[in-house]
Image (cartoon, coloured by chain):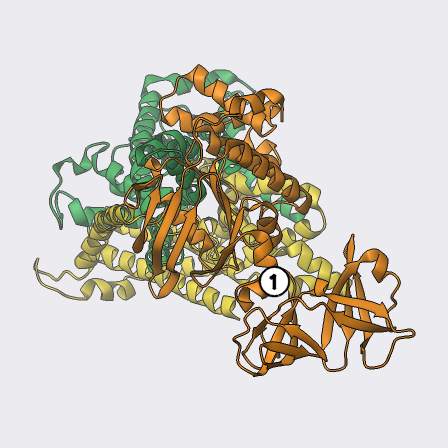
Chain colours: A orange, B green, C yellow
Amino acid sequence: MTSSAAATYAAPARAGVEVRLEGLRRTYGQVVALDGVDLTLQPGELIALLGPSGCGKTTTLRLLAGLEDADGGTITVAGRDISKLPASKRDMGMVFQAYSLFPHMTVRQNVAFGLRLRKVSKEARDRRALEMLELVGLSEQADRYASQISGGQQQRVALARALAIEPKVLLLDEPLSALDAKVRAQLRDQIRRIQLELGITTLFVTHDQEEALAIADRVGVMREGRIEQLAPPTEVYSRPATSFVAEFVGLTNRLPGEVRNGRVTVEGCELPLVDPGVPDGPAVALVRPEAVTLASSAGQESGALVGTVIAITFLGATSRVTVDLGSTTVMAQLPTADASALAAGSQVTLTIRPDPVLVSVDKVAASEA
Amino acid sequence: MPFLAYVGVFLLLPTGIVIWDAVKNPAGQFDLASLKLLFNPEVRTFFTGSIELSALSSVVGAVFGAILAYAVASGNPDGVVRRLYLSGSGVLAQFGGVTLAFAFNAAIGPSTGFLFHAGWYYDFPGGIALIYIYFQIPLMVLVFLPAIDGLKIQWREATENLGGSTWHYWRYVGFPLLAPAFIGATLLLFANALSAYATIQAWENQIAYTAPQQIYIAINSEVGLASNEGDIIAVGMMVLVAIIMVGYFRLQRRAARWLR
Amino acid sequence: MVAVNVLGEGALVDPSARPPGMQLGRRKRLNLFRWVTFTIFGLFFLLPLIAMIRFSLEGKKPGTFSLTAWAQIGSTPDLVSAIEITLELAVITCAVMLVLLVPTMIWIRLRVQRISQIFEFLCLLPLTIPAIVLVVGLQPIYNQIEHYNVSALQLFWVYVILALPYAYRSLSAGLIAIDATTLSEAARSLGANWATVILRVIVPNMWQAIMNALLLTAALVLGEFTIAEILNDITLQVALFNISRATANAGVLFSTSTAALLFAFVLLLILSYAGRRRRRA
């Protein structure tokens, strides 16, 4: 980003606004897409809605944008109730997943389109369009057509177009899902940078948890039309509120164990519980792979937890080691340097770090996803 | 490769014969002078008649066909209505020709009209234009529907999001994008009407209004008119249709680029 | 008449894309527009058909009903022979089209891609040459043929050409839809020879496209008038035309036309059912 672009937006004229969604409901015939969603976005905040297909995250976004009508609930932006306002008057910028650029217009004309609708003069809107294109780093493609630029570039143009009208809120509907992995990561960071610079309140929908964790101020994990947890990324990851969140975000080991007196015993290790109120009895503990440490078994005292290495998956900086304990299989995640000391088929000793864990009390770890 | 021979004999050869006969003079030599016949006022009226009828039916057919196509496209992609209208269009497009003329005679002919007696039925273009429109509309639906389907919902939503109303959408996005496909389809309809022969013959074959009808008369008459008049008119028609089809194909390509 | 994809094959929409919801106000307006449109157009299209059917049921005195017109279909010898000839022509044309086009197209698609452009051009060429123009040049050729065999059935030679564009488009769409190249490569890698590939891998998957092509060809033959008339062959359409010249508005015209319409409709229904069952299997 050039310094001139930074200078233009150093003190954003439109500082972020507060967006409040209260009790949003939406049904399609028999299907309940949204079941009472409450969400408040602080001014300038980026909230990522994360969840599997059909959880309602896109519906929430579309209701906020005004592209669909809610069956219940209210939407307030900067203190004003806009629930009944048509989409064209809501002053929000939206970036769609794909195909949203107008094929018969050049990049510049696309970006300037919103301004044209607002009857801005040709010079003014071309100037602004060029500013926006510089912001996303595409000013050289201004006279090309959508079909002539790559997918990543198209999404950047879409972003420029959405921002050109100086919207109060920025909405992104899985903007990176249709792109290659490498492009995805770059673009994701760029979006976040621009968003921070402009200080614009943003709602970002995705099914990719890595994306959500990487860029959001807060993450809202959704499931079946409700938000299960709304918290900063670190909290969602290390202190998941429900077992769904624990399993959806990051990898989890499901280890059968026994709860007694507010602690759970798993494979001989005693671990504290996130919720000490869980009644005694059998339960399944959700343990993160990084909480599992391995060491080769040579010269260890008896009584330690021992297993056989089944597989080592190289993931770059870290590696995932799958260990067979006889009764269950456990995944551990280690720095690759440490993992390379282990070999498939060798014996290893496991320890589980005593972080508080979640348990799910639905019996039998068998079955399901 | 037998394929080529086959096509050669039954398509290229006759075409060649027509062209050759048209440019032949009585002595059997290549002579473009005979083509001047095309500019003969009498012959011109046939072409004018053809063009008038074709233009009228194709433009009207295109506009109404586009409206109908939009109505069909904006519904449930798998729904009953869509299937019904598409199949119906397919059937109707085949039903044209002689039988269609009978149906219209039955419906609004002056002597037999079931619905009412249209005094203008046998005036030109009058009833025959209406009949042409009857089969042009289904054709338009079949040809234009894919283009409408090609309009992506995101464009509509993006326009709304950027502050545009329905009117803005159609003016800046919808119509411009559909324009090549629409014009192309209209051209196709035009070529279709130009080439039509059966229907108008069944409607009224005592008087020739259009070029195809005149060709018929020319081939069957042994008297008067230059012996290769039929060929010449045929060549004139071919050139006309060829120009139109070229325009059609080029517009199709443009439309495909945007709407696929 | 121009017969385009009967089932609107070009109009296929991806059914997996769930249409997102729309605002209430707009949906209501849209639905109103649709229903009004369908009603108006529906009426426009149905009325002449109704008139025709009504006339086919007309009795001796206006206002009475009778089936004489329908009976006459069977009792007018010219008409009966014309119907026979037309049906036979349809069958022959379809058969020739099938044998000619299907193997050639598959072959070209799988083996000799370079020719496909020229091939496509040739197949679509008949669209640009009106029948009325073509027939003028055909006369001398058919005069030659008549030396060997005088029969209306000889029309099939040119009917195949006429039907070429429609059959080509239908088959081409079918080949693309089933991704013939990938299928054949898979089959070949498993050891099949070319005949097997064509007969047992490609063709069974193309049934719908083939049926569609056949239907379009048959419809074209049934409806063709221009060339038959000028070459003085008595097909169904020509016979009807002659009758109409003799007796304007003879009842039998309407009954036959209605019958033809019903016939086309039935063929269409069969095709769409055959297609649907195939898809489920």
Residue at the image position 64 percent from the left and 80 percent from the top: A257
* Residue C250 visible to an observer of this rendering: no
* Residue type pointed to by label 1: Val
Residue A356 position in % (x across, y down): 62, 68
Residue C134 sits above or below residue A238 on the image: above
B107 vs C67, nearest the viewer: B107
Residue B258 sits above or below residue C87 on the image: above
Residue C64 sits above or below residue B240 on the image: below
As drawn, is A323 to the left or to the right of A255?
right
Residue at the image position 55 percent from the left and 68 percent from the top: A243
B48 vs B17, nearest the viewer: B48
Local SS, label 1? helix
* Residue B57 visible to an observer of this rendering: yes
Residue A12 position in % (x across, y down): 48, 27
Residue at the image position 20 percent from the left and 46 percent from the top: B105
The image quadrant where one finds the N terminus of chain A is top right
Mark 1 crowdedness (10 Å alpha carbons): few <14, some 14-19, many ≥20 = many
A314 vs A193, nearest the viewer: A193
Residue that numbered label 1 is attached to: C203
As drawn, is C13 to the left or to the right of C193?
left
Residue A54 position in % (x across, y down): 47, 60
As drawn, is C276 to the left or to the right of A355?
left
> Residue A248 lies in what quarter of the image?
bottom right
Residue at the image position 51 percent from the left and 17 percent from the top: B32
C139 vs A110, nearest the viewer: A110
Residue A309 sits above or below residue C131 on the image: below
Q: Chain of mark 1?
A: C
